[in-house]
Image: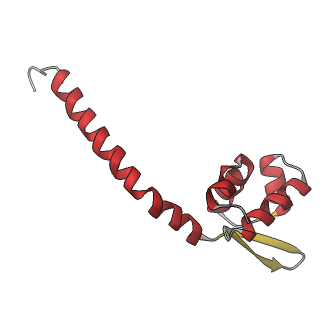
């Protein structure tokens, strides 16, 4: 099985996950939205399902896919320290820019 990051590195899989984040969809829905072939969509969904990112359910004659949040929560937890790192640096940049470029005085207000 591919690593979590290898799974989401593929652009079509990220596009599928983005669609499924909004609502569950059938293979046909995904095909139309992303202009991909049915075999391609099925292949990507199989990889996503095996990695635990999506699950499916049967609805009459259709198989509907939906996102599973747990793997994404693991990625989010892994990214947290990096977010903190960038947040601290961006805050420092904002303070520096505020100090070097103060807002203009507004007279009469």
Horizontal and vertical percent for residue 63? 83, 73
Q: Nearer the viewer, residue 60 or 39?
A: 39
Q: Does residue 43 appear to the left or right of 102 in the view shown?
A: right
The answer to whether residue 3 shows anywhere in this view is yes
The answer to whether residue 102 shows anywhere in this view is no
Q: Nearer the viewer, residue 57 or 3?
A: 3
Q: Quadrant of residue 71?
A: bottom right
Task: Name the residue furthest left.
Answer: 108
Q: Does residue 70 appear to the left or right of 45 in the view shown?
A: left
Image quarter of the C terminus: top left
Q: How many marks?
A: 0
Image quarter of the N terminus: bottom right
Q: Quadrant of residue 62?
A: bottom right
- Establish if 42 lies above or below 109: below
Q: Residue at x 13, y 22 (%)?
A: 106
Q: Does residue 50 appear to the left or right of 101 in the view shown?
A: right
- Establish if 33 lies above or below 90: below
- Establish if 99 lies above or below 81: above
Q: Nearer the viewer, residue 109 or 94?
A: 94
Q: Nearer the viewer, residue 108 or 8?
A: 8
Horizontal and vertical percent for residue 78? 46, 60
Q: Residue at x 87, y 79 (%)?
A: 60
Horizontal and vertical percent for residue 11? 70, 46
Q: Residue at x 90, y 76 (%)?
A: 61
Q: Residue at x 34, y 47 (%)?
A: 85
What colouring style does the render use?
secondary structure
Horizontal and vertical percent for residue 100? 18, 22
Q: Does residue 101 appear to the left or right of 35 in the view shown?
A: left
């Amino acid at each position: 099985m591919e690593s979590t990051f290898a799974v989401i590195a593929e652009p079509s899989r990220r596009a599928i996950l983005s669609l499924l984040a909004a609502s569950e969809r059938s293979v046909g829905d995904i095909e139309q939205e992303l202009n991909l072939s049915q075999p391609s969509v099925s292949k990507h969904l199989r990889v996503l399902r095996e990695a635990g990112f999506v699950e499916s359910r049967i609805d009459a004659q259709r198989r509907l896919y939906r996102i599973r949040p747990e793997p994404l929560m693991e990625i989010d937890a892994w990214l947290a320290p990096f977010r903190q790192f960038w947040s601290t640096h961006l805050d420092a940049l904002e303070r520096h820019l505020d100090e070097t470029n103060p807002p203009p005085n507004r007279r009469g207000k």
